[in-house]
Image (tube, coloured by chain):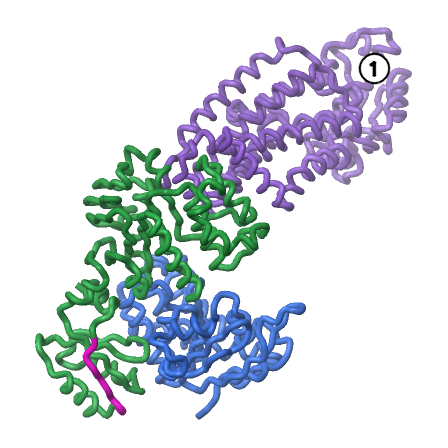
Amino acid sequence: METTIKATNLTKSFGDFTAVDKLNFEVKKGEIFGFLGANGAGKTTAMKMLIGISKPTAGDAVVADYKVSTQADLVKKNIGYMSQKFALYDDLNIKENIQFFGGIYGLNAKLIQQKYQQVVDNLGLENYVKQLVKSLPLGLKQKLAFSVALLHQPKVVFLDEPTGGVDPITRRQFWELIYEAADRGTTIFVTTHYMDEAEYCDRISMMVDGKIKALDTSKALKKEFGAETLNEVFLKLAR
Amino acid sequence: MSLQISDISKSFKDLKALKHISLEVRENELFGLIGPDGAGKTTLFRILASLLLPDEGQANVAGFDVIKDYKQLRKNIGYMPGKFSLYQDLTVEENLNFFATIFNSSIEENYDLIKDIYVQIEPFKKRKAGDLSGGMKQKLALSCALIHKPKVLFLDEPTTGVDPVSRNEFWGMLKKLQKKGITIFVSTPYMDEAALCDRIAFINQGEILQVDTPSAIVKNFAKQVLNIQTPSIYKALRVLGSYQHTHSIYPFGESLHYMDSRKDFDWNEVLNHLRNEKIKDVEGELISPEIEDVFMELSRN
Amino acid sequence: MKKFIGFVKKEFYHIFRDKRSLFILFGMPIAQILLFGFAISNEINNVDIAILDKADDKNSKEIIVNLKASKYFNVIDHLQSEKEIETAFQKGKVKAVVTFDQDFARNLQRPETSKFQIITDATNPNVANTITNYINSIVVKYQMVNLQQDPPPQLVQSESRMFFNPALESVYMFVPGVMTVILMLVSAMMTSISITREKEVGTMEILLVSPLKPSTVIAGKVVPYIFLSLINAIVIVLLSVFVFQMPIEGSIFWLVTASLLFIITSLSLGILISTLSSTQQTAMMISLMGLMLPTILLSGFIFPIESMPYPLQLISHIIPAKWFIIIIKSIMLKGVGFSFFWKETLILVVMTIFLLGLSIKKYKIRLA
């Protein structure tokens, strides 16, 4: 199986504080990988390194065939990113958003038009094309944001707490989109501290104090820690 | 009754945030309002805290009308808004002192009430509130909301954005407060927190879907739930999505929850259908529904 | 009362912990006064002028000598005919041309027909105006000293500003203006921002559900800024007295009273703004666009109200700063008593009562 993310002793220190301490893990092509940790466990710092906006102080990671330490620009070109806090411009309509983000990744006008049509058809957005994104229902907005993150067909998509607080039905519809993308071979990297979100991932890593303390499938983790739920596993680890 | 809400409606422009909400919360109850973002939870909380006027209907909190007796009401409730709402540039101690002063109280006066919570943040009392971790902030906010010994405590999504360890601790604190005689009205988008409440109300799109104890809600659920496990979740999802007898099919973490449109059904028939469609290693069993199953079923209608 | 003190204490924590705002708060008045005092001034020095002396007699020559002797002017050219005037200006060599008619000396005795003309380059009207006034005053002085003559009526056009500012120090003119702007800024902008900050951060929600009365919240917000504004006013006055040797002719009591009154006016404006805006950014924009600009442009601080178009003159009446500037100019520069500015004070009092009433009425006891 092909590997799309491979971290080797990935480390980040700020002064004498080590936020991320020698991470080693691999994520395979088409895998949905859950990256969990409590607030302040180093989750965000680790992800910033993986998406090429922060340089590791030691070690390295290869993301979509490029090294984050020296080829950050190429890493950025080959990944997609979506966070719940910011994903789309609220005051632009669907097309304008797609044109903007398509443009950022260097797609040509013809391809953008084609992708736009595809997104509108796939998500059933015909009735919303004239509206600004801010007036879309939350669920649709998220699906649209995810589709936009996939516009340039990245090898990996990083999702930062994509469905926290979203109603259960919409959340599941969103996960169907994620499954579909993974099925087509896109690697999905989800950072979250919501256990119910983590449950949907193929494998889960749990970070405590800058280190990965556990990494396996949800089922195996529960078995290993003798826990009923992922929440329990996490509580046992964190103590 | 500690809380009486009858026929409350509220609109913002053309958005109907609350549609004829009626609800009762008993004295000393830990009552949960469960619903996703945008369901109207915060609007209802603000109306109950006398921060917003309802368009229609009336509500009583601890015997005070939310419109007429708002002055009395404000003295008798504690309110913790969803967003962290303390002074970030003030230290832990200064925040607490300030809120004690404006409620004509002092930290010492009600120390026994906040003690359990405050001892955890006391080591950081000289630290600015803005520099605290999420869990610590939440404990401080709770202490501030309790400083005047309120009869009713309103907590609007207190656990949103807080990690599981802190969430767990937080619910433990609520249970203790309840023992001290405080009525607690709490909202959350997390279905798994529903089980921790005495009674819950489901809210979605401004409407109350159901009110009951968590166990009764699950017990009275009419549909059977088939839990399906397979390594190829996505393929199974697609197959069952177009299966003629499917009532609903949702991914539930690493498994799928299936409900049939028929009253009685043989679940092996469903599993065999999957196997016939070349889905590998299919396993399944009937399970008692989870709170989330019920919520989704209710909000579908 | 305990609640109120607790609230004020909290406000001071905010103020003293926000180092950047604190720096602006106290750095700005000093910077502005020094800026206006030293750099930006209407004062003119070494202005190049030309002379067209058709009279060429004793009087005109003596006046030219006087012009040359003053530190304000350099006579760099003697023109031969009217035709050369325009080219002199076009080349940008000179800012003004003084012409004497042939029968200047004779007509000097009969002022109403005196043929003496000042032509100025009015691309900068303020400077042109000042130049005209300066030349005029030199000529008038010459007449009074050398001809033992009362100044001829049409030459006593010297503006009131020179009348009460004999040394022609422009910093005197700016002190009342700067004080007005600073008080407006500190009182109105800072209060509105500090109230909207509570809305934005969400703490206003908590304050509202507490038993605090709206009046306590407002008073608690306002008192610290009254205090800070007063300190600023004192700093400005001290600076102008000790750095620029500016005299304070009138009573200190009225100066303080008038300043307090204006501070309260500005504070009520600040509260009003905060009721209209939900974010600090909006509050700041409204304060800057709605208060600062009119205060600077329409109050008579920089541009004389008399020379504004009529509609703007009308608008200037509703600007509190205009009245305050008149009052403190009367106190600081003219040294006149209350009887001379009671009308302006009354206008300001009425405005303040109206704004304060409106802002307390508008202050919401609930959200939205």
In front of the other: A149 or C309? A149
Q: Could you tell me what secondary structure mostly forms the magenta stretch? A: strand
In front of the other: C294 or B154? B154
Taking the image as shown, residue A80 lies to the left or right of residue C84, namely left
In front of the other: C259 or B289? B289
Which residue is found at the position 66% from the left and 16% from the top? C253
Identity, as a three-letter code, of the amino acid under mark 1:
Lys
Label 1 packing within 10 angstroms: few (<14), some (14-19), many (20+): some
Pointer 1 chain: C
Q: Quadrant of the C terminus of chain C?
A: top left
Is residue B283 one of those drawn in magenta? yes
Q: Position of residue B238 (x, y in %)?
A: 24, 82
- Find residue C18 and report its image quarter: top right
Among the chains, which one is green? Answer: B
Which residue is found at the position 33% from the left and 61% from the top? B189
Q: Colour of chain C?
A: purple
- Find residue C242 and report its image quarter: top right
Residue C11 lies, with reference to residue B114, above or below; the image says: above
SS type, badge 1: helix
Is residue A205 one of those drawn in magenta? no
Residue B113 lies, with reference to residue C169, above or below; the image says: below
* One can see residue C251 in this view: yes
Taking the image as shown, residue A151 lies to the left or right of residue B120, namely left
Magenta span: B280-287
Q: Position of residue C187 (x, y in %)?
A: 57, 32
In front of the other: B218 or C344? B218
Which residue is found at the position 8% from the left and 78% from the top? B264
- Find residue C125 and report its image quarter: top right
Q: Colour of chain A?
A: blue
Residue behind mark 1 = C141
* One can see residue A113 in this view: no
Q: Position of residue C88 (x, y in %)?
A: 78, 35
